[in-house]
Image (cartoon, rainbow, N blue to C red):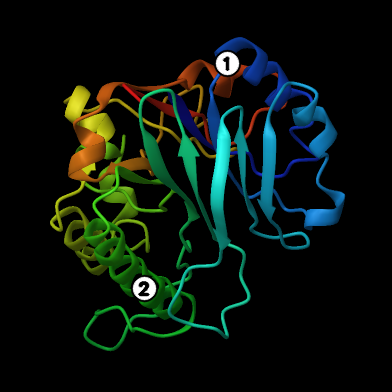
Amino acid sequence: MKIATFNINGIKARIDALPAWLDEAKPDVVLLQEIKSVDETFPREIFEDRGYNVETHGQKSFNGVAILSKLTLEDVSRGLPGDNSDEQARWIEATVVGDAQAVRICGLYLPNGNPVTFDGDGAPERSGKYGYKLDWMQRLHARAVTLLAEEMPTLMAGDYNIIPQAEDAAKPKAWEKDALFLPESRAAFRRILNLGFTDAFRARTQGPGHYSFWDYQAGAWERNNGIRIDHFLLSPACADLLTDCQIDSAVRGRDKPSDHVPVWVELAA
């Protein structure tokens, strides 16, 4: 089973590039972020014609997540539990039924958290967009605990907006005051990992120089000034099924690219 995550930064902008990549890469399941479309206007026919079942959790102009799956989807749910007042479309999950194993898949678009306000001592304040990011990560931690207790092979994948380690940025110094790399953000990410999840990419590939995002500005792609913020976290039962994890970095150099590229895993499921 090949499962990919891809922040497409707008389905309208990627209306040609995304189908082209699907035809080439042939993933069984794709978790999309930043579709920037309400459910009713998502161009599902393009993907259904390719054999994908389509489930969306959309929002006008912002955010939005989706699942494309050539395999059967069951028990689809939308919205991260823990805050009924949260209207941002950032979480979708379902059970995908493979040939040998069912897997619970969770697609997420974690809040960016910028701008960050710092107090007089230079410490980040837990308020505004940064406070929302940290609160969302607390809810993610709670959901992760529940998923682990169900003992089904589970993965949580998407744009985490977290740079886990200095080696995950070409220029880590440039991110020291950014919500993606602040110690509190990284600690919240580690708390989830420490529940027993595996960072699929780092389970297969070590060392610096591996990125999933390059800004559109200042020639970031041409200079390889990137960061790795798109992650697959696998439960122990899911990590046992892992056979590969790769970043399709070449997609960033194509016509009308997203600022993110696809990351994918292969599971023996």
Residue under label 1? 26
Which SS class for mark 1?
loop
Give how far across and how far down residue 79 sits, in percent: 55, 67
Amino acid type, residue under disc 2 in the picture? Arg
Local packing at callout 1 (Cα closer than 10 Å; few below 14, some 14-19, many 20+) is some
* Residue at the outermost top position: 24
Labels 2 and 1 touching (C-beta < 8 A)? no
Give how far across and how far down residue 218 sits, in percent: 54, 36
Using the rendered view, name the quadrant where residue 208 is placed.
top left
Residue under label 2? 139
Residue 103 vs residue 46: left or right?
Answer: left
Quadrant, the C terminus: top left
* Residue at the outermost bottom position: 120
Amino acid type, residue under disc 1 in the picture? Lys
Q: Residue at x 81, y 46 (%)?
A: 42
Q: Which residue is drawn at 57% across and 42% down?
A: 73
Visible residue check, residue 158: no
Which SS class for mark 2?
helix
- Vertical order, 141 against 254 (above or below): below
Give how far across and how far down residue 142 sits, in percent: 30, 71
State the residue in front, 156 or 134: 156
Give how far across and how far down residue 95 sits, in percent: 47, 46
Using the rendered view, name the quadrant where residue 70 is placed.
top right
Q: Which residue is drawn at 33% across and 84% down?
A: 125
Of the image marks 2 and 1, the number of the one nearer the N terminus: 1
